[in-house]
Image: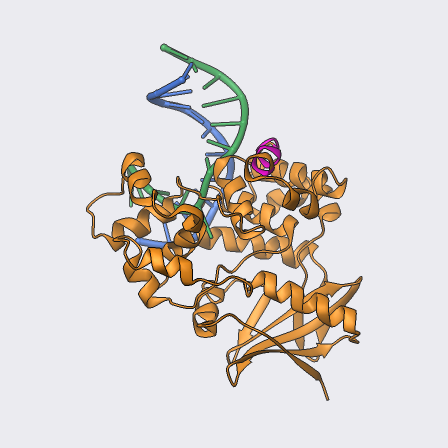
Chain colours: A orange, B green, C blue
DNA sequence: TACCAGGATGTTG
DNA sequence: CAACATCATGGT
């Protein structure tokens, strides 16, 4: 019998909308969703756990399919999932602003209870930002999938495959001969290697960045070649949920606003600044909700 | 077919 | 300092 435990969720937590977000690509290999349950591998204390996350009786539950639990490991698993699914944020203040906001009122109505689903793994967050630069999301997911399939740890269990994102050490060693065949551009290969090296040699750590102010953390990220404004804000938003992280130049954001306001063109930078000036520390959440509104 | 993708960098004027 | 080319390839 598998061990099952619960994690507390914020009021209005909307697991269905989480699943919609998580299922946005059918090329996602870091987790799989079947019958409204998320299954994935997670490394805790150098051991790989296989987990199932689902919502039952108004409670978020975790089933350990494989791996031996201790109190400490269970608490680390809970912490990871709380971080990933943003279970410690109360969205009431966001909704208070958003329901009076002409850009946001519609989306917060539709997606109420959707948390800012993040990327707790720093290597993964930075790599995904680099992979996602300039190319369409479908292609970006193909590249991510190839990186994971070829260089991540694969765990087979009872006819199911699970994957871990490749480690910083692994990615740091990849060169053109490895990734060009998988259709990564020369630039992306270089940027991935530089960022992964910085993480592998502890120049950059999640704990270290977490202690810095928004400006200082961003400065450290942008110092890496290949990480510009957008990528740094994306990482600060998805891995750190920094209140000030706001990728205002993001084309997805522009498209979402165009759609939301029924404009015949994308908003200008001045219009964007005007529209978002009241979002304050909820800018990242506003961005996430607007991205979410682009899903079919 | 041209143009755009959840950009960043290097070069040019 | 702003404008432009380049990257690589899938989607439309």
Magenta: main secondary structure: helix
Any magenta on residue A221? yes
Q: Quadrant of the C terminus of chain A?
A: bottom left
- At a point 55% along the width and 46% down the height, the residue shown is A236
Left or right side of A46 for A215: left
- Front residue of this view, candidates A60 and A143: A60
Left or right side of A216 for A257: left
- Front residue of this view, candidates A22 and A153: A22
Q: Position of residue A132 (x, y in %)?
A: 50, 47
The quadrant where residue A16 appears = bottom left
Left or right side of A69 for A279: left
Left or right side of A258 for A50: right
- Front residue of this view, candidates A244 and A171: A244
The quadrant where residue A254 appears = top left
Any magenta on residue A169? no
Q: Quadrant of the N terminus of chain A?
A: bottom right
- At a point 33% along the width and 38% down the height, the residue shown is A273
A185 over A137 or under it: above or below = above
Q: Is residue A110 visible?
A: yes
- At a point 29% along the width and 34% down the height, the residue shown is A270
A201 over A163 or under it: above or below = above
The quadrant where residue A94 appears = bottom left
Which residue of the protein is positioned furthest toward the bottom in this rendering?
A1
A166 over A61 or under it: above or below = above
Per the rendered image, the range of residues in magenta is: A217-224
Q: Position of residue A65 (x, y in %)?
A: 70, 79
Q: Is residue A30 visible?
A: no
Q: Position of residue C7 (x, y in %)?
A: 51, 34
């Amino acid at each position: 019998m598998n061990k099952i435990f619960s994690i507390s969720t914020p009021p209005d937590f909307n697991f269905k909308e989480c699943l919609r977000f998580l299922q946005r690509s059918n090329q996602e290999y870091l987790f799989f969703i079947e019958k409204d349950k998320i299954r994935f591998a997670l490394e805790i204390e150098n051991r790989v756990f296989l987990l199932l996350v689902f919502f039952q009786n108004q409670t978020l539950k975790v089933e350990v399919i494989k791996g031996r639990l201790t109190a400490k490991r269970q608490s680390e698993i809970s912490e990871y999932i709380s971080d990933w699914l943003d279970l410690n944020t109360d969205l009431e203040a966001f909704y208070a602003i958003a329901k009076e906001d002409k850009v946001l009122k519609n989306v917060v109505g539709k997606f109420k209870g959707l948390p800012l689903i993040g990327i707790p793994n720093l290597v993964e967050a930075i790599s995904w930002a680099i992979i996602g630069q300039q190319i369409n999301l479908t292609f970006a997911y193909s590249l991510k999938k190839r990186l994971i399939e070829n260089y991540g740890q694969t765990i087979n269990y009872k006819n199911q495959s699970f994957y871990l994102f490749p480690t910083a050490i692994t990615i740091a060693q990849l060169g053109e001969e490895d990734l060009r065949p998988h259709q990564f551009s020369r630039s992306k290969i270089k940027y991935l290697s530089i960022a992964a090296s910085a993480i592998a040699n502890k120049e950059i750590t999640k704990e270290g960045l977490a202690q810095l102010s928004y400006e200082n953390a961003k400065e450290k990220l942008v110092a890496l070649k290949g990480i510009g404004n957008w990528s740094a804000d994306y990482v600060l938003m998805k891995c750190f949920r920094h209140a000030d992280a706001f990728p205002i130049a993001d084309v997805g954001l522009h498209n979402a606003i165009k759609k939301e306001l029924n404009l015949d063109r994308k908003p200008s930078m001045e219009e964007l600044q005007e529209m978002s000036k009241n979002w304050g520390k909820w800018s990242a959440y506003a961005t996430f909700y607007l991205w979410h509104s682009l899903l079919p």
